[in-house]
Image: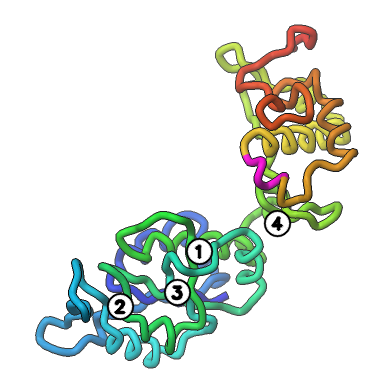
Amino acid sequence: MRIDVFTIFPGAVDSFAGAALLGKARERGLVDLRVHDVRDHATGVHRAVDDAPFGGGAGMVMSSEPIFAAVEAVDPPRPLFLLGPAGRRLDQRLVRELAAGDGFSLLCGRYEGVDARVGEHLCDDELSIGDYVLAGGEVAALVVAEAVARLVPGVMGNEASAGDESFSPDAADGRPGLLEHPHFTRPAEFRGWAVPDVLRSGDHARVAAWRRAAALARTVERRPDLIAARGGLTGEERATLAGAVHQPYAVASPPGPADVSAPPGHHDPDVPRS
């Protein structure tokens, strides 16, 4: 997997990309992340990459010349995405699409924006990581790179981790995914808050059922929009939620999104702690 990033702050991208999971993936040759300094292709004494906008207004606009020159000198993998608010919203489905390919490239904007001819005649598409404004595209580029890189085969130690997490398509029917179930580790009891008994039972079928119910409950409570995208709850899912009434950290009752999950630290007095 090759990912090229075009920016005027290459150090900001390289420093993060050299750490943690992404850094290890680069070291092992699983992800070839290349960072290109647009300023290297600027002309003039000051190597300016921006200029005042035609028509007036506040701020500066990134110029087309150095950006075109930087991209044409490298001939990066396509598609080339301009990171900006008008683009397709990044989600796990798109992340999986990108991870299935051989590579792609990202162009980081700055200032008030990028000359419109860059997006129209050089880039293949525009990509957004959310409805908010950043000072530049570098953080967004790192979000995209890490989200995609972790799905490249061999990058994560446990390959099952990528399939059993928030937003992954439902394995049973391919519908949009749920939020992931809660996780616990040692100690079994901390400050009076106990790990659900079922997770220490050793019964894999019961554990799987609890995790399914907890994922449903958490999604109904916190992201009802995801439930709506799935077409609502199925009869089986409603039954799963109803059957989880006595499970700590699961649910109290199915239907209303406002009352389907017990709060953190909740313990049903009818279920003894061990």
Label 2 environment density (alpha carbons within 10 Å; few <14, some 14–19, many ≥20): some
Q: Estimate the spatial distance between the alpha carbons at disc 1 and disc 2, rounded to whole Å.
A: 19 Å
Depicted 274 relative to depicted 102: above or below: above
> Comparing marks 2 and 3, which lies closer to the viewer?
3
- Nearest to N terminus: mark 3 or mark 4: 3
Residue underneath mark 3: 106
Query: What residue is at 16 percent from the left and 82 percent from the top?
Result: 47
Residue underneath mark 2: 37
Relative depth, front residue between 118 and 76:
118
Q: Estimate the spatial distance between the alpha carbons at disc 3 and disc 4, rounded to whole Å.
A: 26 Å
Contact, mark 4 vs mark 1 (Cβ under 8 Å): no
- Nearest to N terminus: mark 1 or mark 2: 2
- Amino acid bearing label 4: Glu
> Comparing marks 4 and 2, which lies closer to the viewer?
2
Q: Estimate the spatial distance between the alpha carbons at disc 1 and disc 3, rounded to whole Å.
A: 9 Å
Q: Estimate the spatial distance between the alpha carbons at disc 4 and disc 2, rounded to whole Å.
A: 34 Å
Residue underneath mark 4: 159
What secondary structure characterizes most of the magenta part?
helix
Task: Using the image, tell me which numbered label, if any, was put on residue 144.
Answer: 1
- Nearest to N terminus: mark 4 or mark 1: 1
Q: Quarter holding the C terminus? A: top right
Task: Using the image, tell me which numbered label, if any, was put on residue 75.
Answer: none
Label 4 environment density (alpha carbons within 10 Å; few <14, some 14–19, many ≥20): some
- Nearest to N terminus: mark 1 or mark 3: 3
Q: Which residues are magenta?
A: 223-227
Query: What residue is at 60 percent from the left and 11 percent from the top?
Result: 192
Q: Estimate the spatial distance between the alpha carbons at disc 4 and disc 1, rounded to whole Å.
A: 19 Å
